[in-house]
Image: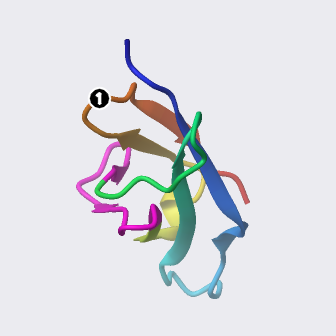
Amino acid sequence: MKKTLILFLMASLLVPVSMFSQNIQVKGRIMDETTSQGLPNVSVTLVGSNQGTNTDQAGNFSLLIPPASSKGQLKISSVGYADQTIALTK
């Protein structure tokens, strides 16, 4: 049975840099639900694009997205875990 991922987005889920079409930085941490430990090498991708990243050894990630995608979704996936899709909000 697949485990569930927990996504803890930092207090600044979206940090608008400016109103001049600059990218927005999304930061967060992917943790195992049962152990609360950060998960390394988890794939974090912006749905509908080729933009993505992987978590570091502590489960942290940072991803720059275009302003037009600021209300998009992130797909979180890792081997042995159920995929999750998280909606972005300002």
- The image quadrant where one finds the C terminus is bottom right
Q: Is residue 56 magenta?
A: yes
Quick check: 41 left or right of 32? left
Q: Which residue is mark 1?
A: 80
Percent position of residue 19, x then y: 64, 83
64 or 20, nearer to the observer:
64
Q: Residue at x 30, y 39 (%)?
A: 78
Quick check: 50 left or right of 45? left
**Which residue is situated farthest in the top direction here?**
1
Percent position of residue 22, x then y: 50, 84
Image: 51 above or below 30: below
Q: How is the image coloured?
A: rainbow
Q: Which residues are drawn in magenta? A: 42-60
Q: Quadrant of residue 18?
A: bottom right
Percent position of residue 13, x then y: 67, 64
Image: 1 above or below 63: above
